[in-house]
Image (spheres, rainbow, N blue to C red):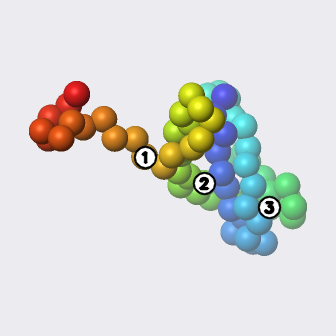
């Protein structure tokens, strides 16, 4: 199930919700104040390497400018 980030329009609280594909975004309410006036935030992602460190981006291009 995807994890979505939301912000409440009434109290500005940021929170996360796990939603299944069958769940409606219109049913999400703020856990702090109970307001249904929330909006989905854009969230980034990170890549984890096998060694456990995280990187914001990964480079797979060769020095020739093509794909390696």
Q: At 80% from the left edge and 61% from the top edge, which residue is drawn?
A: 35
Residue 24 can be seen, yes or no: no
Q: At 15% from the left edge and 35% from the top edge, which residue is drawn?
A: 66
Disc 1 designates what residue? 57
Dot 1 and dot 3 residues touching (CB under 8 Å)? no
* Quadrant holding the N terminus: top right
Q: Nearer the viewer, residue 51 or 43?
A: 51
Residue closest to the far bottom = 11
Q: CA distance from mark 2 to mark 3?
A: 14 Å
Q: At 30% from the left edge and 35% from the top edge, which residue is drawn?
A: 60
| Quarter assignment of residue 31 | bottom right
The label number, if any, that marks residue 24 in the structure image = none
Q: Position of residue 39 (x, y in %)?
A: 62, 58
Closer to the camera: disc 1 or disc 2? 1
Q: Within 10 angstroms of label 2, few (less than 14), some, or many (20 or more) residues?
A: some
Indicate the secondary structure of the residue bearing disc 1.
loop
- Seen in the image, is 36 located left or right of residue 22? right
Residue 39 can be seen, yes or no: yes
Disc 2 designates what residue? 40
Q: Within 10 angstroms of label 1, few (less than 14), some, or many (20 or more) residues?
A: few
Q: At 80% from the left edge and 57% from the top edge, which residue is drawn?
A: 30
The label number, if any, that marks residue 35 in the structure image = 3
Q: Earlier in the sequence, mark 2 or mark 3?
A: 3
């Amino acid at each position: 199930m995807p994890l979505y980030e939301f912000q409440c329009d009434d109290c500005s609280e940021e929170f996360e919700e796990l939603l299944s594909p069958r769940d409606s975004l219109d049913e999400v309410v703020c856990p702090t104040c109970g307001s249904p006036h929330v909006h989905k935030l854009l969230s980034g992602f990170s890549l984890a390497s096998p060694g456990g460190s995280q990187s914001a981006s990964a480079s797979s291009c060769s020095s020739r400018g093509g794909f390696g």
